[in-house]
Image (tube, rainbow, N blue to C red):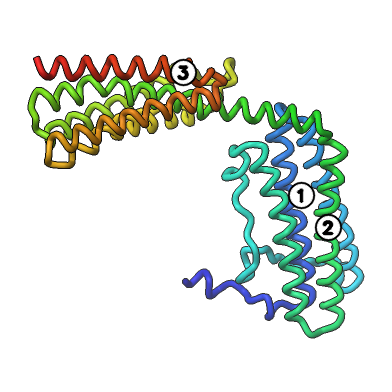
Amino acid sequence: MRFLAQRKRFKDLSEQEILALAISSEEDDARIYRGYAERLRADYPASARMFDGMAEEEDTHRARLIDLHETRFGSTIPLIRREHVAGYYNRRPVWLIENLGLERIREQAAMMERDAERFYLTAAKRITDSATRRLLGDLAAAEAGHRTLAGELADTHLDADTRSDEDAAAHRQFILTWVQPGLAGLMDGSVSTLAPIFATAFATHDTWTTFLVGVAASVGAGISMGFTEAASDDGELSGRGSPVKRGLASGVMTTLGGLGHALPYLITDFWTATALAIVIVFFELWAIAWIQNRYMETPFFRAAFQVVLGGALVLAAGILIGSG
């Protein structure tokens, strides 16, 4: 609260401070665009060139703003940035965006331009001084021009074939980093825990004990799969992406796969819990088959036959062992 109280309200800024704020904002945005360009250059060179062009345009507008400041107020520009002004739009830290994929970066860039334009238009309505209103209007028009330029740059550097190739590469990276490890984890968690959970259930007819065994098996399998996936490949040569992301996807999905048919045993009635658990197993196995078909291009009926048959055999083994 003390920090918020120390921030200056926009209506209290002088015209010089408004101009200085615009200059610092243009400089920040140019640096962000260059950061995106460097992040994308190796894998998506066309998108990197687009962001290079947008950064150059931000530099051009910043230079015009500096010239205007020197004409009106001299060469000493006050130090004021967006975090110094209450209610001013904030930029998310680059490191929260740059690892989220190509399309997310493009969306963030479009949002940056919309935020800037909206701010200047709103600010112009709150200022009564004609010169300041004219200045803010010019800045709003400049930001609108940035959005038009972004479209033109995208058309120049991202033709249909290039965009298709880059989107395909991004989709492939998504599958390698998230879907493939997550699917492996879901299969392991759903299938490998069937035998111990149902063996315990039919051996003890105790729902609470079965639940505890199911949770232990699920969490243990999740931890094991997560560390195994992360340690098996650092992603440098295979191009499969961050081992931390892959380990997280595999570990979480393994745990969820096991918990799905362990949670029904929170129900105290044994046969009700078992019937519900078997129904959940059925949906889990069909979900695995759907994911294989959707993302791994495995024919659906072949995937369903493999997964459902394998799961049914493991389920039967667990029941038989527990009933013996």
- Please name the residue that numbered disc 1 is placed on: 30
Type of amino acid at the residue the image marks with label 2: Arg
Instruction: Label 1, secondary structure: give it.
Output: helix
* Label 3 crowd bin: few (<14), some (14–19), many (20+), radius 10 Å: many
Viewer-side residue, 180 vs 282: 282
Residue at x 83% of width, y 47% of height: 151
Type of amino acid at the residue the image marks with label 1: Ala
Residue 100 in view of the camera: yes
In this rendering, position of residue 308 left or right of residue 319: right
Q: Which of marks 3 and 1 is nearer the N terminus?
A: 1
Image marks 2 and 1: residues in contact by CB distance under 8 Å: yes
Picture layout, residue 254 above or below residue 140: above
Position in image of residue 123 (x %, y %): 73, 74
Residue at x 30% of width, y 34% of height: 260
Specify the quadrant of the image occupied by residue 175: top right
In 3D space, how far apart are the residues under numbered discs 3 and 2 (Cα atoms)? 57 Å
Residue at x 23% of width, y 17% of height: 316
Residue 223 in view of the camera: no
- Please name the residue that numbered disc 2 is placed on: 62
